[in-house]
Image (spheres, grey):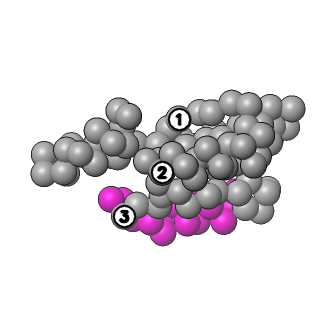
Amino acid sequence: MKRILITGAAGFIGFHLALHLHKRGDFVIGLDNFNAYYDTSLKYQREQVLQKLPVHIANIDIRDRTRIKELIEKHEITHVVHLAAQAGVRHSLTQPDDYVDSNLQ
């Protein structure tokens, strides 16, 4: 069985990938920071759906390397699908470091 970590798991693509992989029989754990750039209510609704499967979503910022490493070791993750990203172009003009940290590093 594959043990898969999905970053950005509360987003549209991450959520649907988690559903698919779980249905396929893989162990799936998600990671998302639930930032408020978009309405968080939909992200939390997706989290509730996944938790019933059960697929846990850890509330961790992608930039927190220590906690991510601990999560990978704790759950013996064999595969990572990186879908987390800071969205929106306008915000990048005033906060470019947020985009470099989340999307490039």
Q: Identify the element where label 1 is drawn.
A: strand
Q: Check disc 1 and give the amino acid type.
A: His
| Marks 3/1: CA–CA distance | 19 Å
Q: Check disc 2 and give the amino acid type.
A: Asp
The answer to whether 3 is drawn above or below residue 29 in the figure is: above
Q: Identify the element where label 2 is drawn.
A: loop
Q: Identify the element where label 3 is drawn.
A: loop
* Residue 57 visible in the picture: yes
Tell me residue 1's x, y (percent): 86, 32
The answer to whether 30 is drawn above or below residue 13 in the figure is: below
Residue lying at the far bottom of the rendered structure: 41
Tell me residue 26's x, y (percent): 81, 37
- The label on residue 82 is 1
Tell me which numbered mark, 3 or 2, is placed earlier along the sequence.
3
- Mark 2 sits on what residue? 64
| Marks 1/2: CA–CA distance | 14 Å
In this view of the protein, which residue sits in the foreground, 65 or 46? 65
Tell me residue 35's x, y (percent): 40, 61
- The label on residue 56 is none
- Mark 3 sits on what residue? 36
In this view of the protein, which residue sits in the foreground, 37 or 100? 100
